[in-house]
Amino acid sequence: MHSSTCRNETREAMSRFSVAARSDAHPLHLVAPCDTCRAREFSACAPLTGEEQTRLASIMRIVNVEPHCPIFDEANRAEYVFNITAGAVKIYKLLGDGRRQITGFLFAGDFLGLIHNEAYAYSAEALVPTKLCRFPRRRLEALLAEIPHLEQRLLAMASHELAAAQDQMVLLGRKSARERVVSFILMLSDSATRHGRPNDPVFLPMSRSEIADYLGLTTETVSRAFTSLKKQGLIELLDEKRVRLCRMSALQEIAGGF
Amino acid sequence: MVDTLTARFLDRRTIDKAYPLVRNVVPGMTTARWTQFVRPHLVPRSPDWPRGVMTIQNPAGYILALFAFEVRADLHESRIFYMDHIMIPDLPGRATIWASTIGAAERLAEMNRCGAVRAEFGAGSEPSDRDFLTSLESMGYSLAGIRAFKRLEAKSDRTGDGSDRVRRPPRGLYDA
C-alpha cells in the first residue's frame, strides 16, 4: 500500500474511531487469541491465570497495521493502550518547524500509548506489518486495580515510549557517530534477547535515515559508520535489515559497555 | 516500596536519561533548562545537610518518577526532609509509583535523622495533584501550612533564560 494512501485512509478511520489502522478480526479471536500470541511470554500478560487472561482478552481487540501507517498521532485523545504482539513501531514527536524527531523504536512485547496527559505524548507508526492488542485505557486501568500482579509486571518489565526515549537519551550521550551506531545495534540486540527474539543477526526494521534521525546524525554518516564497521570485520551486513555481530567484545568496547 | 521498583540517586550520567520523564510532566521543558536546573542539586552543600534528586526505577533501569530533596533546618523539627519537583507521569499503576516515591522519601528522611517530611507539589504536576493528595492521606500525611505564590510577569527576564521559559498558568494560594 502506498504510504500516502495509507495515511489518508487511516486518518479517516481515526476520525471515526480515534484509533489508526485497519482492523482485521484475528481468525482465532473468538476462541483464545492469547493462546497463540508469541509475545505473551515476554510481555506483561505472562503471569496471568487462565481466568485473568480471559478477562483481559474480553476488553481488547486485535489490530493489524500495515507498514508506514500511523497507529496514533501526538495530541490525539489517549483513549487506548496498545501491546505490540508482532512487528515494530517507531515513535516520534513533531518539532515546531514541522520536522519529525524519532524518539524510539518498540517491538513485540512492548507497550504503546501508556504515557499520556489526556492526549498521546508521541506519534506512533508501524515500520513493518504490525499486530497489536488494543485496550480501552479506562477499562485496562480498572482491570489493573483488580489484578495487582499484572500491574506489578507492567511496571517492572514493560517497555514503552518513555523507556524508549530514555534509551535514546543514553545513546545521544555517546560522543562519536561510530559509538552511537554501535550502541544502537547492541541495544537492539539486547532488546531482542529480552523479548525472546534472536539477538544475532540483529533485525533492523528501520531505514538508515530513520536510524540517523533517531541518533541525531545524517543518513550519510550512518551509512559510512555501517560500512566502516563492516570493513573492519566487526559486523556483517546480511541484507538491508539484518546485521551479524562478528566481534562482540570489540563492539562492546566501542559502545562503552552499553 | 514495591519490591519491583528501586530508588536511586540521580547523578551527572543520568541527568539526560531523566529528561524524557521531565518533558512528559512539564511539556515544553528543554534539555538545557532541565540540565541548568538540576546540576546544582547534585552538589551537596555539606555532608550534614544533603540535597539531591531521587529517582524511582524499574528493574530494567527506566526512570518512572523523580523528586528533588533537601534536608533543612526547621525551628520546630530541628531537621526536616523537604521534597519538591515531584514528577510522576500518567502511567497505569501510578498509585504504586506514588507509594514507592513516598516510601523512598521517608527512608531517606529517617537516614538523615529528620523529624518530619514536607512535600511540596504543584508546579508541573497539576494533573496528578488529586491522586497524590489521596495517596498522601492514606499514608498518614495531612495538609499543613499555606504557601503563597505570585508570578512576577514583569520581572520574568530576571530568570536569565526567558527564551525557553516554560509557561504555566498563574496560581494563587495553595496548601503545601
Image (cartoon, coloured by chain):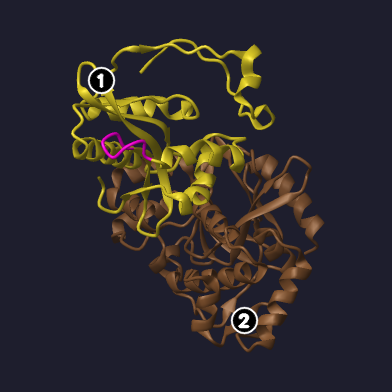
Chain colours: A brown, B yellow
Q: Residues within 10 Å of mark 2 (few under 14, many from 20)?
A: many
Q: Nearer the viewer, residue A74 or A12?
A: A74
Q: Is residue A23 above or below residue B160?
A: below
Q: Position of residue B115 (x, y in %)?
A: 18, 27
Subunit bearing disc 1: B
Q: Nearer the viewer, residue A234 or B75?
A: B75
Hey, what amino acid is under mark 1?
Asp
Instruction: Classify the position of the C terminus of chain B by image quarter.
Output: top left
Q: Residue B75: name its quadrant.
A: top left
Q: Position of residue B70 (x, y in %)?
A: 34, 32
Q: Are marks 2 and 1 in contact (CB under 8 Å)?
A: no
Q: Residue at x 72, y 70 (%)?
A: A222
- B44 sits left or right of B16 in the view: left
The residue at which mark 2 appears reads as A243
Alpha carbons under labels 2 and 1: distance apart: 60 Å
The residue at which mark 1 appears reads as B74
Image: magenta residue range: B44-50
Q: Is residue B85 above or below residue A227?
A: above
Subunit bearing disc 2: A
Q: Residue B118: name its quadrant.
A: top left
Q: Residue furthest front?
A: B46
Q: Residue at x 56, y 88 (%)?
A: A246
Hey, what amino acid is under mark 2?
Val
